[in-house]
Structures are given as structure tokens and as C-alpha cells.
Amino acid sequence: MVDFAQVPTKVGFFTPERFEADIHDCEVLGKLPKDMNGTFYRVGADWFYPSKYPDDAILNADGYISMFRFTNGVVNYKGRYVKTKRYEADRAANRQLYGYYRNPYTDDPSIRDPSKPNLRTVSNTAPIVHAGKLFTLKEDGLPHQIDPHTLDTIGPYDFEGAWKSQTFTAHPKIDPVTGEMVAFGYEATGLATDDLFVYTMDKAGKVKHEIRIKVPYVSVVHDMAITQKHVLIPFGGYTTSMERLQAGKIHWGWDASKPSYIGVLARNGDGKDIRWFKGPERCMMHTFNAHTVGNKVILYAPFFDSNFFPFFPPVDGSPWDPKKAKAFVRKITLDLSSKKDTWTEEVLWPFNVQDLGRIDTRFMSLEHRYGYTGFQDAQRPFDEARAGNLKGRVTNCYGRFEFATGKLNTYFAGPTHSLQECCFVPRPGSSAEGDGYLIGVAQNYADMRSELIIADAQNLEAGDIARVILPFRSSAQVHGIWAADGELA
Amino acid sequence: MISRRQFLVLGALVGVVPLRVLSKARPVVSFHLDAPYLDLTGQAMPYRPPLGARGGDALAGLSEADFVSLML
């Protein structure tokens, strides 16, 4: 019998979805743009069975992929669990067999295998489309190939045996100039190992280059950035060890005494040229973009001051501090001509933001003007009677952040809504940066439903052009991507 | 009559929450980055869903007898 009452955070609006869905011709408020043809793929986490431990991370929930497909003014919706080995094992046993996030030592003995931790992946973090194929990703396992039309799971993918890391990042980068995909895997040779492998796949999806490096200490390496010349590997703060895992703890703890690092290496080198720049306490999860100018590498990223995950507690036993769990839009300059091993950092806006930064991906690895992300504007109204006591605690706005000028344009979602990660959709036929739509799913707490928002990215203050209404609340997305018609096989 | 919510809390205290945590504070469901989380220190601002069945709060406040009578 399934009983989510043992997981106190899975109540009301946040009860897991636990079903797969098909909706033909979704309800739409407003008018859909006629030139918007393609698919918005979203990947998130949804517990099919309750977690074994009430304080486990939501990051450990089953992967769920959904899509809004736009075709000539009609939107169809589809949602499916990612059918991982783990999902299938749980379904066969009719219960949760797997323990804490990335700790196989806490698994049921019937499936426990610490030598193959990547077989525990739930593939719940991000979708990516490359070389005509759709994948779901999570940094503790291999990509899972997904049928882009049915969302059926085809299975794990190792690039025809050429991908040697046990893991694959949730944030590979696609170079719009060459069509190459650059990706990495950390803990590449097993639990708590310090190996990190970087790969380049050509535009046909074939592995063309491999670099193997060691990291200064084993930590979460969640995202990366590329320029036309360099690969950037940022991380900091989180630590783990075999002793920690064998003691039955969740994979990561936060060690505020650890420095943050950004590794910079040549894209086509052998890794021996890597320079590790060192910085203060930082939680480095997501990046906007980076570019190289002469001997300088410029990185824009919404990094946190400190640990932002309450379920990865400090290793010194102190309580998690929500006041330091704030992300700011930062410009980081790494000077390759300097002998110093530090960087310079500038906070571009004085308020904290959602760290799920996005750009117009046609400018990935190139100098760019805009970044997009959500933030909380506490001055906006929030209807606590209808939506709970969340005033000042939800992401209620999307912003277009113009890095060079400090200009900010804002979209407000409404007084009972919180916003998930946004995504930029280029306007067909346009090549100008920022000409397109900003889309993202809002959770409407009052009406117990989710709504896909579509706004003009160049006129956010005007509000949304249209909203696609789901007649239920979808489980929270982690990341999403837009795939225009023609990108998929 | 014990309410459903009280029953769940007691159950959690007996069987799920580690003793070392109980000795310090009672966990509380709070809210961070658009999602609820379990604050083991008990110091965070609690999350209170909206009133009404859609928030789940009304059912949680019912006694077992009330709940069963509604279902019949």
C-alpha cells in the first residue's frame, strides 16, 4: 500500500503526481503566437513510491519527462515517467527499494550494488536534444534516450561505447557555431572518486575528443560553461567520502571551510593545461554563459553565497542557514595571463535571484547581452488566503537581465503563482539576440493547477501573450528546453 | 479523539525521526525555493497551506471518525 503520510513535505499541492498524462488540444487563455511551432520538453522529479527516509532530497525522486507540443496554434501535452532500471525495480517490488540520494549503502539488499552507483540514477534533472536525439539527464548516471514523440524510454546511452565515464552531467553545452556538444562526467570511475572526464561530440553525436583530469576535491560539479576556446568547470563547498557513504549518510555535506574552484582548460587540449582558480565560500550550481576575450575568460553565473540545499546539511553539525542560501547574478573574470590563482567577481544586481539562469542559446559560448531567470519581488501582491502563507517566499517574476547596462525588464506571474525555470524560444526567421518568447510553467496554488506562460521576451512588462492551462498540478520541473520543429529525428 | 494530523505527527516521532533530532527540536515543514522542505531544527517559518480541501489542511484536521464519516 502506498502511503505518502510518512513524508511530511508531500502534502496538498506537493503530493506527487503519480500518473502519466495525455491531453489533446489543451485549454489556452489568450492567443498563441502563430509562428511558435516546436516542443517544450521538461524534466523533473516525482516520487512514484515514497522515499525511504523523510529527510531525503527531492533530487532522489523518479524522473518524469513532459512536453508541450505546439503545432499550428494547437498545444498537446504528454507526461511520462522515465523508465529507468530503478523505476522498473520499484514497480516490480511494489515499494521503494532505494535509500538516500546517491548512497547505495542505504539500499534494500535485494538491489544494493555500490560498485555500480550509476544504475541507481533516476534521470530526473534535464532534457537535451543533440544530433536529432532526445535524452534525459542526471549527473549520477548515463543519459537515457527518449522517443521524442511518445516519450517512451529507449534506455541508457553511452555514445556507442565511446563514453567511458560512469556519469554524465545534466548540463552539457552545445556550441551554436560548430554544432558540437561538450559534456563531462564527475565521480567518473565510481563513488567518491576524483576523476572527471570531459568529452566533445561532433554535430553528428560521435565522440571526437576526450580529456581526463583530477579535481582538487570531490564535490558536486553540477554545471559547466564553454567559450569558443575554453571549458570551465566550477564547483565548491559540498564534500563526500566513502566513509560518509558507508556510514549511511546522504551523499553530500556542506563544508564551509572548503574553497570554491573554477577550472579552465582548452577545449581541444589534453587537460594538462588546466588552471584551477580558487575563490571564497560559494555554492556554484548553474551558469548563464561565458566567452573568451584575449587572455581573459568572462563567466556570468547566478552562484549562491553558500549551501542552498537544506537536505545536504553542514558537516560540522550546525543548522542549515537559509539567509546564506541566496544566489546573485555575478560577473566573474578569470585572467589567464595573471600568475594569481584567484578571480575577480562583481555582483551585478543587489537582490537575489532564482539560480536557474538561461540565455538565448544561439549565443552559447559567445559574447551576449541578456540572461533570463526568475526572482522574488516581495512588493508584488500575494493572496495568502487562497495560496498559503508564502508571501515573500516564492518566485513570482521573470527577469531579462542586461549584463552590460544593468537594465532589468520584468514579468509578473500573478498573486497565487510561483514560477519554475524559464526558457527562451527564438522567433523563427530572426537572428537578433533576445528576439523571441520567454516561456515557463507557473504553479497556481489557489486553483491547484499548472499553467504554461508565454510572454514576448522583448516586452515582458506587457504580461503574458497566452497561458496553456493544465487541469492538474504537474510535478515541479527542474530544467526544460525548447526544440524547434526539425531538430529531432 | 486524536486527529489525523496528530496521529501522523506521533507516528513520525515514534518511528521515523532520529532520537538525536527529537532531543533538540521538533521538525517543521517550511518553504524554500518554491518547494516545501523538512527543517530538522524546528526554527524555520512553518509552511501553512491554504484553507480548503485543495490545500489538504481541512482533511488533516479531521478526526478519524470525522474522516470515515465523510467517506461513507
Image: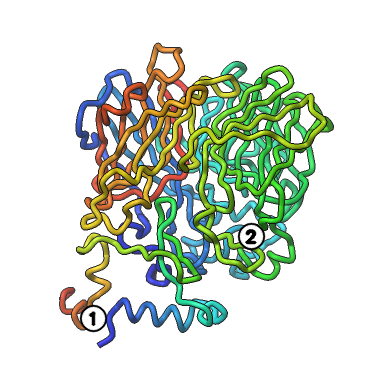
Taking the spot 76% from the left edge, 26% from the top edge, the residue there is A336
A14 left or right of A304 in image? left
A407 left or right of A308 in image? left
Residue A162 coordinates in the image, percent (x, y): 71, 34
A426 left or right of A235 in image? left
* Amino acid type at image mark 2: Gly
A472 left or right of A289 in image? left
Tags 2 and 1 both on a single chain: no
Taking the spot 26% from the left edge, 46% from the top edge, the residue there is A381
Residue B6 coordinates in the image, percent (x, y): 33, 80
**Residue B63 shows which numbered tag?**
1
Chain for mark 2?
A
Disc 2 target residue: A253
Taking the spot 42% from the left edge, 36% from the top edge, the residue there is A41
Chain for mark 1?
B
Q: Would you place residue B13 above or below residue A75 in this image?
A: below
Query: Cα distance, mark 2 to mark 1?
Result: 40 Å
